[in-house]
Image (cartoon, coloured by chain):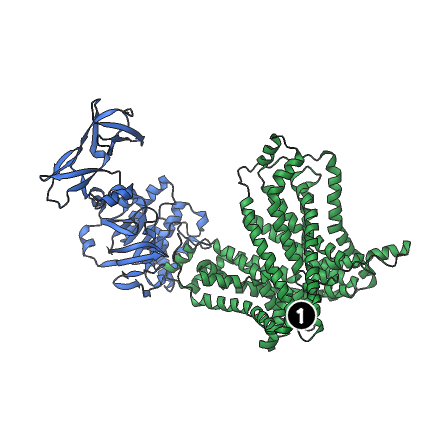
Chain colours: A blue, B green
Amino acid sequence: MNTKTIADAPPVVSLQEVLKTFGNTLVIDKVSFEIKQGEILALLGPSGCGKTTTLRLIAGFEQPDAGTICIQGTEAASPSFLMPPEQRSVGMIFQEYALFPHMTVVENVVYGLKGMERLQQKKVLAGMLELVDMEGYEDRYPYQLSGGEQQRVAVARALAPCPAALLLDEPFSNLDADLRTQMRLEVLSILRRAGTTAILVTHDQEEAFILADRVGVLNQGRLEQLDTPEDIYHRPQTPFVARFVGQADFLTAVVKEGQVKTELGSFSLDEPLPHRGLRVMIRPDDIDFTIDDRGEATIVNREFLGSENLYSIRLGSDEMVRSSQPSTTIYPIDQKVHITANLDHVVIFPYDKKEIEEEG
Amino acid sequence: MGWQVQRPPPVIWIPAFLIGAAVILPHIYLVLRTLGAGGDLWDLLFRFRTLQVLARTLLLIIGVSVVSVAIALPLAWLTSRTDIPFRRLWAVLTALPLVIPSYVAGFIVVAALGPRGMLQRLLEGPFGVERLPEIYGFPGALLTIVIVSYPLVLINLQASLRGIDPSLEEASRSLGQSQWSTFRHVILPQVRPAIASGALLVALYTLRDFGAVSLLRYETFTWAIYLQYESSFDRTMAAGLSMVLICVALAILFIEAMARGKGQYYRSSSGSKRPPAPVQLGRWRWPAFSFCTAVILIALFIPIAVLLYWLIEGISRGEPFHLVWGLAINSVYASVLAACVAVLFSLPVAVLSVRYPGRISSIVERSTYIGFGLPGIVVALALVFFGSHYAGPLYQTLCLLIFAYVILFLPQAVGTTRSSLIQISPRLEEAARSLGRKSLQILATITLPLIRSGLLAGAVLIFFSTMKELPATLILSPIGFKTLAISIWSATSEAFFTRAAAPALLLIFTSAVSMAFLNIREQRVK
């Protein structure tokens, strides 16, 4: 799908300053975003960050304590109003699929087509089964299907009534690793072919990056950043995002004469910054080292990750960085090294004392 | 994470509230009216006779509990941990007397040992015995209730003994302790909570029992309440006695709940599933065998022999057995109605408590559990009071009787409906909603089809419980409406033993079927 049509379409779902508490816990903290026609958006975050609650708010299973949710331009929920889920035209795919165990594949798929003419129902059914490649499974019961097949039926069932938007709650977490990779691509192609507007919830950054046009990173109920996968990875706006979407280390830095000075070198700023103290994020693939017995840094740990070795290195100032190296050569722990850093992709954050203490 | 609950739809909460209110109102009325009686009542309550009844009741409760434990503890150990011959057979047989309703046991004891009973008739010919020692009163009531209630302790103990980690026993032996010392210091402390909770179940059974104490004329609360109710127009005394009975019942339930809490603490970790090596009884094998035989003889075989004796006696005397079918049809009719209504009532209550948990739904759910704590006679009395004042046209009709059954067995119905609902993920209902269906449609197309077998099981369970119910049936059945239970009771109290034999056998049979059904279901759930 090309980016221009996405940008021009009206928002299908929009959240404005939505806030949700369970008892005394704030679960969603003033979250706002919009999804456009045909867009796939991933909400990414650790467990308990509020991503599933956001989905359930959109579906209508929860009511916001503040803010409004609009679906296709109509108000669907506010603290004083709750449009019931069955009137929202929002489909949902649950983590455990929630296929009706006492109904066949056909009965499951046509369940949402109530009130439609029989002939029309049959047409939609046939189209859906073809879309998810489940022809020939019409009379099976859910327990007779594999995990991947159940998922395809769940997709067909949710798409059959032509919902304005489709919500997917950790849809691949019940599948084993092999099948997960395959189903991700399959579901993505189904959604693209159907031109579905979708919101996906996941804790797996890889999944979010593969599937989504835009990724929203949630942390403790706050939407920390909403951007394209590339921007999320390369231009994280908060240290949390930087850390959550990949390995990231932080170096303290000072600004002097338009130059940012870190222990691993300096670089110049494109524009002047108001801060004097800074933190600079650097990823392990931008750090290299050479064996040097008079080096200022020491290898303290090595993690074997299959295709690479991830070395933890203590710098002279006691700060830690990690460096990824090919897994074929092994360097001993306690080895003194000299570090070279590629500072082209670093990201700069203001030095926030409180935040650092929180991170321990 | 607990999702915040949405407000339940009116189709759920309105019926649930009405049912909760209907179940609880008669009892509130009973309490209010009793308290309203004022000075007289306190006079009545502290009268010598009331205290006498209380003393008798407590004496019987303690007696039955002690004797039941004394029988059940060795039986449980022998049938679950030793190499006694035919161990598995004993384990099944010793639990079987549980299927005998207490008034049937009462009938059997009176028909065997009472005046003009089987034993006296057998001894009369050869030895000229005309009188046996008196069976009525404490000894008869004790014997009767022990026979039918010791299995409650036994089953509890067997489960607990099987749950003990065998390595604890092995550890004790390897530390140089003898078999006996191991039993005393390792096993006994671990099964103590099971003994306590079993004994409390027996105590509650004894307290609520009406059939045995009435047939053996031992005046505990239930029997005293019935006598008072039957003999006077002013029913305040009966109500007052009921209040005391409720207090004792609540006290036992409270102690039981506390004991159960402690039981959790004692439960050993299930580290190994290895079955323990059975204890070698050696020269104690045959004495142990004789003990089991004696218990089974007294609690199972002799009762059946007595029943068959009077059945054959009845046949030879030309007892009109076709009448039994009329009684059976009445019993089945009332029980089917009660089962259906109870299950229907359980639906909104269970849906409310499972899908919309909160303080109000838990109040509604708990109010339907009132029948669990109250003896049938008290529920019946509350309905008589309430019905004669506020539901005139319903008084003395089948409706009121069915309603009494519903109050008594609604806890079972709510329990089974609840547990089948819990197994259905709320995500299924949410999926249906997101596909555009409304609550009632979802109930009909998703929820009900999925819990159908659970509902059916609940109905069957209540059917059998209703078949056996005596005190409420006795007080509330419409004039001329006789059931199996009533006929056994009245035939026994008038010493028409031949007349009671066939209905008693029929009831034991239904009761056995219900137990088997329950067991099969429990194993399938596991």
Residue A283 lies, in percent from the top left, at: 22, 37
Instruction: Decide which of B221, B403 is in the foreground and name it.
Output: B221
Depicted B200 relative to depicted A84: above or below: above
Is residue B331 left or right of A258 when viewed as pictured? right
Depicted B390 relative to depicted B484: above or below: below
Which residue has dot 1 on it? Answer: B44
Which residue is found at the position 75% from the left and 38% from the top?
Answer: B286
Quadrant in the rendering for residue B101: bottom right
Q: Amino acid at mark 1?
A: Leu
Which residue is found at the position 65% from the left and 54% from the top?
Answer: B202
Task: Name the quadrant of the C terminus of chain A.
Answer: top left
- SS under mark 1: helix
Instruction: Decide which of B268, A33 is in the foreground and name it.
Output: B268
Residue B246 shows in this picture = yes
Is residue A250 left or right of B410 when viewed as pictured? left
State which chain disc 1 sits on. Answer: B
Depicted B281 relative to depicted B435: above or below: above
Which residue is found at the position 67% from the left and 36% from the top?
Answer: B180
Instruction: Decide which of B355, B375 is in the foreground and name it.
Output: B375
Residue A345 shows in this picture = no
Q: Residues within 10 Å of mark 1 (few under 14, many from 20)?
A: some
Quadrant in the rendering for residue A262: top left
Instruction: Decide which of A99, A13 is in the foreground and name it.
Output: A13
